[in-house]
Image (cartoon, coloured by chain):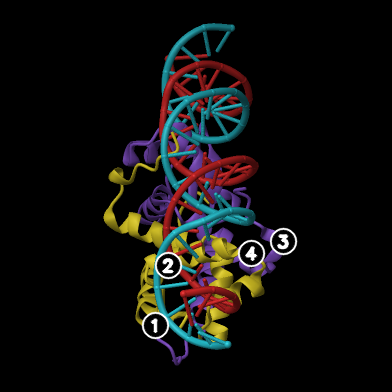
Chain colours: A purple, B yellow, C cyan, D red
Amino acid sequence: MGLTKSEIFTGEQNRLASLFKVLAHPARVAILQYIIDQKNCICNDLVEELGLAQATISQHLKELKNVGIIQGTIEGKSVCYCIDENIWKKIQADFNTFFNQEVKVNKCC
Amino acid sequence: MGLTKSEIFTGEQNRLASLFKVLAHPARVAILQYIIDQKNCICNDLVEELGLAQATISQHLKELKNVGIIQGTIEGKSVCYCIDENIWKKIQADFNTFFNQEVKVNKCC
DNA sequence: TTTTGTTATCGCAATATTACAATAATATTT
DNA sequence: AAATATTATTGTAATATTGCGATAACAAAA
């Protein structure tokens, strides 16, 4: 198999899992941290900083862009990437909602 | 390839990504939500609730157990699973640290 | 227009993940 | 001890992800 059965889960569960998945790779965590630290950057900055091939970085940037957490603006022959603050805060809020569920004491553990 | 180059990232980046990865599947999100809602449950409850095969649920439980977010206690012939509150809060704190990095306004986007 | 700099896409190979049937392992019940 | 109930593990097939070389696409500079 190898095919996640998305249809048996709720939209919220699938959406949350998708958000977690985008962050589930150290390169994408590193990219986000770098962009936050530098305020913005271009693809080649990340190639130098992280030591992954340009094609690989471009692919990771695409995934981050797909969920909207970053956005790219064409600037001459390069593309300036930065965090989309609104989406960032929205994702943060979604995670908070998930984690702020009260974990009650239970009998068996 | 297909092999994440963990060695080029920091321990924190790898650790964060691992945490996100555990939550990056709707079945595991659903399992956590169910356990939180019911306070605790056994594997077979989840098999009925989610409609995945027993082997599949057991595998997902194992991954959740591996990061410590849940723990299982043998109770007769079944195993009672529940959230490990301390680990849960620790993960929540880690995510907050990541997300609370200030995202500053930048020039290009 | 040619060259240069930058990014995106395609195609491929390697590895990882997901799902499940079959079965082993373990504890309880009869 | 045999049957039952529950979970874990193993093996396998299907799909997904990761990484990169090659190359296309595009804009600026020469």
**Residue B52, label in figure:** 4
Q: How many angstroms separate mark 1 from mark 2 (CA)? A: 21 Å
Is A7 positioned to the left or the right of A48 in the image?
right
Please tell me if label 1 and label 2 are on a single chain.
yes
Q: What's the distance in space between the residues labelled 1 and 4, CA to CA?
A: 26 Å
- Residue holding disc 1: B85
Q: Using a 10 Å C-alpha cutoff, classify the residue at mark 3 as few (fewer than 14 neighbours), some (14 to 19) or many (20 or more).
A: few
- Position of residue B66 measured from the top left corner of the image (x, y, whole percent): 38, 65
Circle nearer the viewer, 1 or 4: 4
Residue that badge 2 annotates: B99
**Left or right of residue A34: residue B53:** right
| Chain at tag 4 | B
Amino acid of disc 4: Leu
Same chain under badges 3 and 4? The reply is no
Asked whether the beta carbons under mark 1 and mark 4 sit within 8 Å of each other, the answer is no
Q: Nearer the viewer, residue B56 or A49?
A: B56
The quarter in which the N terminus of chain B is drawn is top left
- Mark positioned earlier in the residue sequence (2 or 4): 4
Are discs 3 and 4 less than 8 Å apart at CB?
no
Q: Amino acid at mark 3?
A: Glu
**Marked residue chain, label 1:** B
Q: Nearer the viewer, mark 3 or mark 2?
A: 3
Q: Amino acid at mark 2?
A: Phe
Q: Is residue B52 above or below residue D3?
A: above
Q: Secondary structure at mark 3?
A: helix
* C-alpha span from label 2 to label 4: 33 Å
Tag 3 residue: A7
Q: In the current view of this chain or complex, which residue is farthest to the right?
A: A7
Q: Chain of mark 2?
A: B
Look at label 1 and name its amino acid.
Answer: Glu
